[in-house]
Image (cartoon, rainbow, N blue to C red):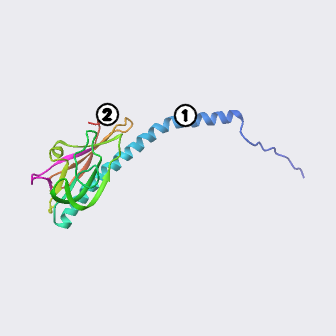
Amino acid sequence: MRISRIRADRGFSLMELMVTIAVLAITLAIAVPSFSGVIGESKLRSQAGEIQSALTFARTEAIRLNRSVVFCHSNNGTNCTVPAATGWEGWLVSAAGAALAAPVLPVSRTGVIPAAPMRISSGPNLTAATHAIRFTPQGLARGFANNIPLSDLIRVCITQESVNPNTREIQFSSGGRSRVVATDNAGTCP
């Protein structure tokens, strides 16, 4: 009976280690920019979805409570305010009070909008309506101070070139329905 001994090599040679590190470096150089684009896209989609969900909630609450409910910009989570030049800082949903600055408490739902690179802005009709949408008991979108039908958009944008398209528009109609549409502004926010 013959027993052969096989020598087992343990460890890596310097050449094998260098090739492995080079392949890993090339893979990371290709993957990291793609990951930042994926993360930016996820943040953009998430923020647009959150605002659309809040609009749907406000409309549903107006119908359920059989009273007007307001969705508006809020920088403090307790009353409606005009956004800063840099864009929306947050929003709130509450039963509509007698004045825009004084919604009926308690506030039903609030949201905080993260700072740069995200920017949220109102379309021209919503800006003219003091950045507030009043949903009637029938679920219709109206300006707060009047009963004029309100159709416009809320623009969610990210200033990140690796995200394409970099803008989501939450378009809402005077009938109260909303939808999210992707648009591209070449890495800039209007």
Decide whether residue 113 is among the magenta residues. no
Q: Residues within 10 Å of mark 2 (few under 14, many from 20)?
A: some
Number of the front mark, 1 or 2: 2
What's the amino acid at mark 1? Ile
Q: Secondary structure at mark 2?
A: loop
Q: Nearer the viewer, residue 92 or 185?
A: 92
**Element under disc 1:** helix
Residue 147 on the magenta segment:
yes
Residue 131 place in picture, x, y as percent: 20, 47
The one nearer the camera, 15 or 51, is: 51
- Find the magenta span and give its range: 141-155
Q: Amino acid at mark 2?
A: Ala
Residue 10 pos. (x, y %): 75, 43
Q: CA distance from mark 1 to mark 2?
A: 28 Å
Quadrant position of residue 105: bottom left
State the mark number for residue 26.
Answer: 1
Q: Residue at x 39, y 36 (%)?
A: 162
The spot of residue 150 in percent (x, y) is 14, 50
Residue 139 against residue 51 in the figure, above or below? below
Q: Quadrant of the C terminus?
A: top left
The label shown at residue 186 is: 2
